[in-house]
Amino acid sequence: MTTTSVAAPGAVQDEPLYRILLIEDDRADALLVEELLHDTGLRFELTTRTTLAEARTALATSPVDCVLLDLHLPDVSGTEAVTAVRALAPHTAVIVLTGLSEARAGTEAMAAGAQDYLVKGKVEADLLHRTVRYAVYRCQTERASSEAQATRLRAEENARLERGLLPPPILDTSTVTVTARYLPGAARALLGGDFLDVVEGDDGLLHAVVGDVSGHGPDAAALGVLLRIAWRSLVLGGHRGGDLLHLMERILVAERGSPSMFATCTLLTLDQNAATATLHLAGHHEPLLTTPEGTGEVTAAHGIALGIVPELRSWPPTVIPLPARAALTMYTDGLTEGHNGATGERLGVEGLLTLIGNLPRTDPAAHVDLLIKETHVLNAGRHTDDVAVLRLDWDGGQA
């Protein structure tokens, strides 16, 4: 086993360094390949291994740009060697070295995933130079294309999930201004299980929900969409309060992918004529009430999260009076669990209220956007969680 790092004669110093792994058990052939590489003009680092088992260790411990692979190794041969190397290093270029009598071996190797092949005894320095450069370039291009495709598919999936997690509100006569925002926890990430919705019932009451499914990824997002649609359907069907939460919990238990999955949520029913809001907290934190005097956390009774103890069904209601001009903000914990600047502590509700108190007074949409932006600045990317925010504003003689 050898490792050689050189700049071949005539190599241009600003050209890339090619990290090449030669898997060849014939010492004479290995020496010939090394001499040819010296004549190519390439800047290269050559590592030689004699078996696939040795190569497996080399691929696992060091980055490799190109593998020069003999098809007749002591522990593997033929296209099985190509398949094995591709499995170990799927984003590394593979060039197969075949014998003079193996007319079909090269094409079969390329069909198995190799970028190119060279016939021993017919390789010159210029050919090796072009083959290595082209194989590495082609492999890098394929990888970039694959990543771009994955990014596009992820964006399309995010868009589909976002339509389910952040639907347009159903409002008829309500004068409440609805501001809704949803942000995934990390760039290029799939949306998680946070969800929200607002509908006006036939009784003229405004109903809202903000929820958070445990975990992240497509399973949590799918369950979040399911619960959001179930909530809307059940509300429009006349279900309210504890009965509504019980039915949502039954759906969650039936549809969740793992018994450990659960969901927290806040249900709110806004009665504009009575100037009251009725809250049901299922493992979720209290909303914030904003008045001309400032913002504070609403005091409300707590109930158990959905799916924790399905038979318990404990979600006590809380009725709060509402001023003529105010706003209620419901949110998921991604807004408060991030870091509070350089202190190393979590922002928390107290930190969030302090932040809100320092923000300029502006329209609801701009205020929510600025609030989310400032929490992200304080967090500085150290904690990644989804954020859902729903703000309801009203201004009139009646709530």
Image (cartoon, helix red, strand yellow):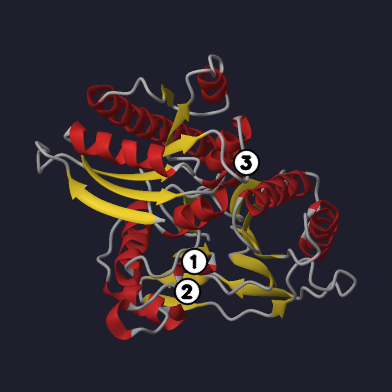
- The three-letter code of the residue at mark 2 reads Glu
Give the position of the N terminus as an image quadrant: bottom left
- The three-letter code of the residue at mark 1 reads Gly
Q: Which residue is mark 3?
A: 76
Instruction: Determine which of the numbered discs, if any, sits on residue 334 in the image.
Output: 1
Residue 393 visible: no
Q: Secondary structure at mark 3?
A: loop
At a point 59% along the width and 74% down the height, the residue shown is 285
Calculate the distance from the C-alpha at mark 1 to the C-alpha at mark 3: 51 Å
Calculate the distance from the C-alpha at mark 3 to the C-alpha at mark 2: 52 Å
- The three-letter code of the residue at mark 3 reads Val
Calculate the distance from the C-alpha at mark 1 to the C-alpha at mark 2: 5 Å
Q: Position of residue 272 (x, y in %)?
A: 59, 57
Quadrant of residue 123 in the image?
top left
Q: Residues within 10 Å of mark 1 (few under 14, many from 20)?
A: many
Residue 253 shown left or right of residue 148 in the figure: right
Q: Is residue 216 above or below residue 124?
A: below
Q: Secondary structure at mark 1?
A: helix
Mark 1 vs 3, N-terminal side: 3
At a point 26% along the width and 38% down the height, the residue shown is 35
